[in-house]
Amino acid sequence: MSADTVRWGILATGGIAAAFTADLIDLPDAEVVAVASRSPEPAKAFAERFGIPRAYGDWSALAQDEDIDVVYVATPHTAHRAAAGLCLAAGRHVLCEKPFTLNLRQAEELVALAREHGRFLMEAMWMYCNPLVRRLKALVDDGAIGEVRSVQADFGLAGPFPPSHRLRSRELGGGALLDLGVYPVSFAQLLLGEPSDVAARAVLSEEGVDLQTAAVLSWESGALASVHSSIVGGTPNSASVSGTRGRVDVPHGFFSPERFVLHRDGRDAEEFTADPVDGPRNTMRHEALEVMRALRAGETESPLVPLDGTLAVMRTLDTIRDRVGVRYPGETPAGDVPSDLTPA
């Protein structure tokens, strides 16, 4: 890594990998040098699409490429443990898509591996890096609405998704909670930290994944959060934070907002909007910029997306799944799966 350029590898070639790569190549201090897939053909097609010099037909070759500073892992989350672990063990830094892993045990193993090898590791929770979300958090932390008493957030897609779709596949960690519910849970914990108690209900599919899940998170402070996710009904995808002296409303797309409205008791409502210089609303460039900033600073984790916070969210997701009875192949009720997962 030079003072000017951070060299990236892309592991996987799906839609989210394409979106992230498109953002990366627009950054003058980022260089995408290689891409890998499970077979050569999709890797070559992806490389040609984005002008990437090298394409690998297996993950190990990418992990061993010493020209790569950091790898972006964009596989389905059932493979995050294997893919990110392979890269960390080979000495690469890693940005891993959300949900970070299938469950807490796998997440703890990745964090331990990164710390053992002194490598940077971050969950790709782009919401935490969004400038407008950071502004919202700063206002709340500074007491703009008093003490937080409730958070509401939802993320739902109308579908319908057929049984063959990955969102309904137990083998691929399907269901609303891990794919979508991770955002409302992460939003609540961004503002309140890890909850002290969790209650949840879900509607399960014939395949045994959650079609929709609702959870109430509670804190010893008396704060409550109501979070909902669905793959059978489109929802407002909005969020609201209420405190003892006001409220913040975030309209559609709270995880990457265009605006939010601050209501303070006794004052006119204030609207905060995204700065055009920060780029388009639906961009992942801010998380890429944070990774590169941290690498240049010699940091092994980001203060915006700290690893302990990622583990806390995974602990909550595990607890919700345990409450509603969603378990994936090989898991026990406690959420354990074998740690020696290998790429399919």
Image (tube, rainbow, N blue to C red):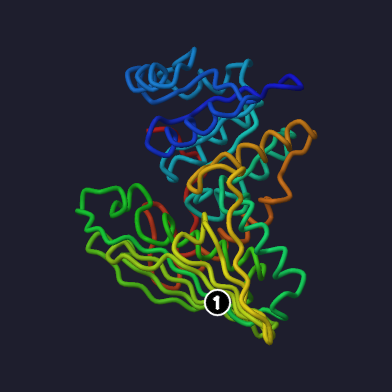
Residue highlighted by disc 1: 225
**In the image, farthest residue toward the top:** 53
Secondary structure category for the residue under label 1: strand
Q: How many marks?
A: 1
Q: Closest to the observer: 300 or 90?
A: 300
**In the image, farthest residue toward the front:** 268
Q: Quadrant of residue 87?
A: top right
Q: Quadrant of residue 134?
A: bottom right
- Asked if residue 50 lies left or right of residue 92, the reply is left
Q: Closest to the observer: 240 or 343?
A: 240
The residue shown at (62%, 15%) is 67
Counting from the top left corner in percent of width and height, residue 162 is at: 19, 53
Quarter of the picture containing the N terminus is top right
Q: Amino acid at mark 1?
A: Ala
The residue shown at (45%, 62%) is 181
The residue shown at (50%, 77%) is 226
Counting from the top left corner in percent of width and height, residue 94 is at: 61, 35
The residue shown at (44%, 57%) is 178
